[in-house]
């Protein structure tokens, strides 16, 4: 710092103060120069309404851009001062100082933003690491990504989280276990960019966590960091602590709302109408054919050789019964005898075989409709279609796998991914998962690592893993090449693996520490695919309505019969009803008198009934009932006949 007469050392003035000093100094200088050119700079009143620009401002700005004074730092504290054509300051350096203020580690200047020039040799830097290790504080770089590392929720406003306490997750716990084993302390540094480490061929540099290790900003890097040959060339890795492979994340087919009347689906409405019309038409045809078929006119009393009348049983009721019985695959207890009605019936049977069997086959398919939807089951299925787009995490090893693959299937997939518009690559796994969930009509699948996929589908029940792993690899802890403590870290990791600690941590972060409830197990899920009552509810309704109708018809028939009994027996309707009802409810009785037993004291026609019952008892004793029958032929229903 070179202000004449003032002795300033870098530690006695703050950077902000120095910058402010230079800014004011330069502003004054520019205004003086502007005056020298004859232009006057007069301050004007500014108001919110007055939108006119202050004209000298432009002149001052161009003077500032052209400011090249003090390159030797005569009056400036932060010299040299120069600007680019956008007005940004150029030609300065920032020094990276570590711990001790005199310990300048590296230098950065804006002309080469990707490069941090180290002022210390590789050997010095390793020595530095060694010193830090022995002092016991190791810097661990990581990125935020569940379940490996997440920002801890603050329990209350006063509960301020600091240092490592700000984060939680699998990586944090694993490093804590390692640190305990190795007797060191560690400090987590989270990388905002969220990049794990990709190599940029144009700038010939690495980014993300790998960059952190290369620049020695961290000794270790941990997250879902895949060990790849490229990364292995520039950094060292511990033995893998988790095995995984690339898998496909896809959305499950939406479960169709259960349809109670799904049993109607196999046929279109038209087909149902045609079948019903044909049923009625065929019944009518059968009725008329039977009427003109001589063989169906039969002797009602076979014992009579020469009957005066012939009878045809094929009335409308029976015809309907025959045709219905065959369509229901049940047959009928009476069958036509004439050639023509038999021919018509057999053609109807043929029709019903085809129709009912087509119905059965279609019904099975319709009820399991969900499973028959076109599905993606593997990477091959994805590759051979263009409708469903698929992508990967941008700048990760999964993307690298497809880009570098020599296998034609994956090469085809890479070409499809590269050419897809809009881009199918996502900035984070979470974004990829959300895209799979939100893309309409399930038109996006995300290729991601099985470990993270497994974590996602634990609670996002609409998602599933499709097919097998496309490769097999592992996550490791990255560290500088030839890191002196690599073998100690590996040994500790192996010990933790052997003790089952790593599996325990996986269970903890994949299952136990979940805020959202876990999805039901696959078997329960399959149960959901089984036919539920809702799927066949309509059949139950049809049965219920049919039985209710049958019951109503039975009651009506019963009441009609009671009426006939009351008329025949000359008793009141209520009496007849009581007698018939009592009999019907007495389930022990399996035989019924043709004529009901009317209580003696119960009717207006009591005397004839009493007389009759007296005569009946006497008659039965004398076997006069037979005579009685003969006297009133054809009136068996009304004739009193004792049970035998
Ligand atoms: N774990 C991967 C990596 O290290 C990320 C990915 O591509 O899924 O880059």
Image: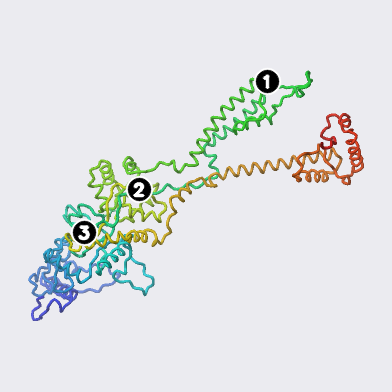
At x 50% / y 39%, what residue is drawn? Answer: 364
The image shows a total of numbered marks equal to 3
- The residue carrying pointer 3 sits among few (fewer than 14), some (14 to 19) or many (20 or more) residues within 10 Å by Cα, namely many
Circles 2 and 3 in contact, beta carbons < 8 Å? no
Q: Position of residue 3 (x, y in %)?
A: 10, 78
In the picture, residue 501 is in which quadrant?
A: bottom left
In the rendered structure, find residue 444 and report the number of the disc placed on it.
Answer: 2
Pointer 3 residue = 210
Q: Label 1: state its secondary structure.
A: loop
Q: Is residue 60 visible?
A: no
> Which quadrant is the C terminus positioned in?
top right
Eye-nearest disc, 1 or 3? 3
Task: Point out the tag, 2 or 3, that comes first from the N-terminus.
Answer: 3
Q: Nearer the viewer, mark 1 or mark 2?
A: 1
Checking the image for residue 293, the label placed there is 1
Question: What is the quadrant of residue 610 in the picture?
Answer: top right
The mark nearer the N terminus, 1 or 3, is 3
Q: On the rendering, which quadrant does ligand 1 occupy?
A: bottom left
Q: Determine if residue 251 is in view.
A: yes
Q: Is mark 1 within 8 Å of ligand 1?
A: no
């Amino acid at each position: 710092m070179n202000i004449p007469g003032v002795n300033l050392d870098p530690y006695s003035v703050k950077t902000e103060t120095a910058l402010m000093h230079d800014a004011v100094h330069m502003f004054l200088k520019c205004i003086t120069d502007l005056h020298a050119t004859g232009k006057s700079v007069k301050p004007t009143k500014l108001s919110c309404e007055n939108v006119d620009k202050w004209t000298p401002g432009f002149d001052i700005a161009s003077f500032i851009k052209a400011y090249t004074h003090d390159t030797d730092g005569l009056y400036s504290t932060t010299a040299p001062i120069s600007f680019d054509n956008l007005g940004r300051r150029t030609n300065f350096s920032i020094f990276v100082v570590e711990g001790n203020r005199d310990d300048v580690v590296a230098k950065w200047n804006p002309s080469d933003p990707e490069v941090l020039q180290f002022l210390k040799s590789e050997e010095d830097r390793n020595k530095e690491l060694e010193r830090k290790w022995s002092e016991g504080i190791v810097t661990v770089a990581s990125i935020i990504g569940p379940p490996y590392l997440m920002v801890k929720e603050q329990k209350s406003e006063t509960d301020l989280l600091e240092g490592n306490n700000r984060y939680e997750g699998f990586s944090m716990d694993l490093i804590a276990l390692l640190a305990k084993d190795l007797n060191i302390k560690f400090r987590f540094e989270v990388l905002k960019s969220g990049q794990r480490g990709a190599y940029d061929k144009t700038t010939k540099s690495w980014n993300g966590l790998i960059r952190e290790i290369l620049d020695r900003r961290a000794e270790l890097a941990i997250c879902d960091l895949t060990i790849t040959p490229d990364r292995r060339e520039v950094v060292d890795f511990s033995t893998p602590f988790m095995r995984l492979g690339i898998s496909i994340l896809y959305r499950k087919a939406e479960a169709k709302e259960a349809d109670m009347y799904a049993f109607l689906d196999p046929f279109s409405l038209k087909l149902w109408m045609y079948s019903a019309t044909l049923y009625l038409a065929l019944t009518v045809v059968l009725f008329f054919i039977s009427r003109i078929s001589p063989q169906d006119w039969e002797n009602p009393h076979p014992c009579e050789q020469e009957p005066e009348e012939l009878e045809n049983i094929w009335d409308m009721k029976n015809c309907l019964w025959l045709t219905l019985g065959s369509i229901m695959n049940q047959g009928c207890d009476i069958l036509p005898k004439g050639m023509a009605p038999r021919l018509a019936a057999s053609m109807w049977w043929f029709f019903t075989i085809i129709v009912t069997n087509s119905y059965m086959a279609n019904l099975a398919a319709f009820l399991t409709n969900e499973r028959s939807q076109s599905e993606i089951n593997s990477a091959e299925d994805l590759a051979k279609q263009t409708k469903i787009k698929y992508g990967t995490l941008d700048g990760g090893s999964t993307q690298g796998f497809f880009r570098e693959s020599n296998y034609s299937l994956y090469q085809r997939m890479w070409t499809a991914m590269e050419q897809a518009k809009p881009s199918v690559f996502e900035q984070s796994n979470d974004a990829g998962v959300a895209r799979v969930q939100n893309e309409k009509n399930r038109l996006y699948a995300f290729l991601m690592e099985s470990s993270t996929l497994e974590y996602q589908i634990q609670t996002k029940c609409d998602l599933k893993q499709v097919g097998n792993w496309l490769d097999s690899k592992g996550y490791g802890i990255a560290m500088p090449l030839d890191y002196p403590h690599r073998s100690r870290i590996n040994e500790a990791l192996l010990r933790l693996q052997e003790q089952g600690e790593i599996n325990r941590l996986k269970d903890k972060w994949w299952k136990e520490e979940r805020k959202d409830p876990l999805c039901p197990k696959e078997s329960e899920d399959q149960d959901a695919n089984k036919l539920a009552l809702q799927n066949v509810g309509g059949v139950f309704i049809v049965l219920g309505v049919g039985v209710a109708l049958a019951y109503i018809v039975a009651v009506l028939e019963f009441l009609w019969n009671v009426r006939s009994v009351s008329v025949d027996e000359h008793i009141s309707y209520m009496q007849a009803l009581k007698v018939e009802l009592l009999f019907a409810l007495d389930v022990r009785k399996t035989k019924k008198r043709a004529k009901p037993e009317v209580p003696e004291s119960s009717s207006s026609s009591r005397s004839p009934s009493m007389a009759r019952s007296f005569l009946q008892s006497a008659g039965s004793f004398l076997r006069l009932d037979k005579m009685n029958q003969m006297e009133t032929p054809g009136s068996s229903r009304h004739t009193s006949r004792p049970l035998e």
